[in-house]
Amino acid sequence: KNEVEQSPQNLTAQEGEFITINCSYSVGISALHWLQQHPGGGIVSLFMLSSGKKKHGRLIATINIQEKHSSLHITASHPRDSAVYICAVKVETSGSRLTFGEGTQLTVNP
Amino acid sequence: EAGVTQFPSHSVIEKGQTVTLRCDPISGHDNLYWYRRVMGKEIKFLLHFVKESKQDESGMPNNRFLAERTGGTYSTLKVQPAELEDSGVYFCASSQDYFPAAGIQLGNEQFFGPGTRLTVL
């Protein structure tokens, strides 16, 4: 079983909808990252969190350390948000390397 | 400022051949990581350099993989001989540690390169 689990694996939404992607982890962490990968493209870091909540434009990321859970929200979704969203954690006992979830494929239709 | 770059973007080789992937980190970043994603699986860690030293190579799958970072700048990852199961996307990332006060390290965000897609036929 992967130490980082994401849900859903695939998500299709209509433009304008509010989107939530979830990430649960089973280990102690020092930080959690949300990453974005466009088709054929590289990986872009969206957020790095260790507590609370961060907001950037239409993106909001939250983390609950006690529950070992994080969510990525997209408000007023747009077709250009279509991408794979990846949750990755820095495990406390594993130095600075990242452990990744499998990713969530998001498709936003116009 | 230039980001993390990787070369080549794609490589198609036959089983048994050798391939060398290159990563140029962001200038000044001491930490360099190699990760890979094989088909249908999550991205997995391969190894971590701090400057020219291997800090953690626990993710290297076997001795067909050799990573180097001479001079603590760019890094190469050589696969020799390549096998079918080595196909995937190889990502490089770099980061900079911050030590504002003695012994205190702030979280270090990793910046990823575009990846090299390796296909072994």
Image: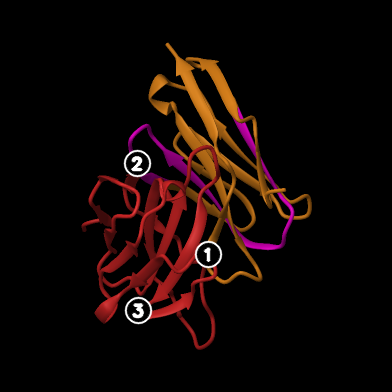
Chain colours: A orange, B red
Mark 1, residues whose alpha carbon is within 10 Å: few (<14), some, or many (≥20)? some
Q: Taking the image as drawn, is residue A17 in sight?
A: no
Q: Which residue is mark 1?
A: B59
Q: Nearer the viewer, residue B32 or B44?
A: B44
Image mark 2: chain:
B
Considering the whole magenta stretch, tell me its main secondary structure: strand
What stretch of residues is rendered in magenta? Answer: A20-44
Q: Secondary structure at mark 3?
A: loop
Image mark 1: chain:
B
Mark 2, residues whose alpha carbon is within 10 Å: few (<14), some, or many (≥20)? some
Which amino acid type is shown beneath numbered disc 3?
Lys
Which amino acid type is shown beneath numbered disc 1?
Gly
Q: Which residue is mark 3?
A: B51
Q: Taking the image as drawn, is residue B37 in sight?
A: yes
Give the Cα separation between the discs numbered 1 and 3.
18 Å
Q: Where does the image place residue A98, in percent across and percent down from the top left?
A: 54, 59
**Residue positioned most to the right:** A66
Q: Where does the image place residue A91, in percent across and percent down from the top left?
A: 63, 63
Q: Which residue is mark 2?
A: B121
Q: Are labels 1 and 3 assigned to the same chain?
A: yes
Q: Where does the image place residue A36, in percent across and percent down from the top left?
A: 44, 40
- Earlier residue among tags 1 and 2: 1
